[in-house]
Image (cartoon, rainbow, N blue to C red):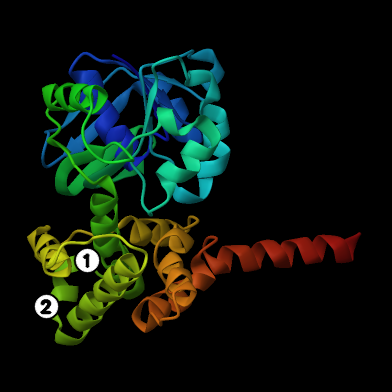
Amino acid sequence: MRIAVMGSGGTGGYFGALLARAGEDVTFIARGNHLAALQTQGLTVDSRLSGDFTLPARATDKPDKVGPVDLVLFCVKAYDTNAAAELVRPLIGPDTVVLPLQNGIDAAERLARVLGSERVIGGVALVTSSVTAPGTVTQTGGAGKIILGELMGGSSTRTGGLQRTFERAGIPTQVHPDIQIAIWEKFVFICAFGGMTALTRLPIGPILASEASRELFVGIMHEVAEVARARGVALPKGSVERALTLAASFEPWARGSLYHDLESGRRMELEALNGAVVRLARESGRGAAFNFAVYAALQPYAEGRPAERSRSVERSSSDRTSA
């Protein structure tokens, strides 16, 4: 299968590497130092699930040089979705499937508006991984699983085919009869897991060990579940309890991607996570105080480390004064 990985960071790099190791024809779309390392040194994966390995990587920053593929694994940050969707166009052929594996709840719908709903299926990635050095992806937690399904529900020939391809590569895969439920169940989890590890700067173990922070963690999830049901998503009973059990099953040192972006001074997906909960809650006439607390505390960092931006502003002001 010809596969293009659009966004070759923690999620795309990890799953793309497993597919390439299994013999699939994989091209990684990347940029900057990460791209340079992929092209010169290959892709290194450090994984508690799949072992450590390095393999040659076909990588480029020009999707138009790749041509049509069978599958696009769409793994960019949520805030880059619209721009990256336009770049995907040269990868689309008559039977291309686009599978978003992103945080947030609206990736598939946004892609469908650009690429056509017939091209896009829904997806969920249950993995904690990040780029720890150019050309190196480290997987530290999660089941390493993909859940996918047709946007309108049910299974199909193409979802079954993808499941077989992924499982040959050692990726546990489930075809969900209602992918919107799976997307929102992950959203329930990730808003608390990502939000709390970023807010406290602590891994999941100490967060759940503290009575007060555990209560906040659970409160965040309940608010997300209430928003989901207000929007007509049939979340099963016990979704919050299952998400809490999932969090407790993670290694105690695990942290969410919001934390890793915060720690590195990078732009954060805050608007697509806790910020989205706050907005949707207000639209439905309800509050989301726990998610607002996380959002408000992290919002000054959302575009990157404030100190770095302040120094940039000071330098710019100094330059104008000198001129």
Q: Write the residue at 21% across / 39% down.
A: 146
Q: CA distance from mark 2 to mark 1?
A: 11 Å
Image quadrant where residue 193 sits: bottom left
Number of labels in the image equals 2
Element assignment for label 1:
loop
Q: Write the residue at 48% across / 62% down.
A: 271
Work out whether residue 212 or residue 276 is closer to the camera in this orientation and state it: 276
Which badge, 2 or 1, comes first in the chain's sequence? 1
- Residue 300 placement (x, y as % from top left): 53, 72
Residue at the extreme bottom of the image, as rendered: 212
Image quadrant where residue 269 sits: bottom left
**Quarter of the picture holding the C terminus:** bottom right
* Amino acid of disc 1: Pro
The answer to whether one can see residue 313 in this image is: yes
* Amino acid of disc 2: Ala
Numbered label attached to residue 16: none
Disc 1: which residue: 203
- Residue 64 placement (x, y as % from top left): 55, 17
Work out whether residue 216 or residue 8 is closer to the camera in this orientation and state it: 216
**Image: 46 above or below 228:** above
Work out whether residue 234 or residue 212 is closer to the camera in this orientation and state it: 234
Q: Write the residue at 26% across / 35% down.
A: 14
The answer to whether one can see residue 62 in this image is: no
**Quarter of the picture holding the N terminus:** top left
**Image: 20 above or below 35:** above
- Residue 19 placement (x, y as % from top left): 23, 23
Image quadrant where residue 322 sits: bottom right
| Number of other residues with Cα within 10 Å of mark 1, as a class: few under 14, some 14 to 19, many 20 or more | many
Q: Is residue 27 left or right of residue 265?
A: left
- Residue 320 placement (x, y as % from top left): 86, 62
**Image: 271 above or below 290:** above
Numbered label attached to residue 209: 2
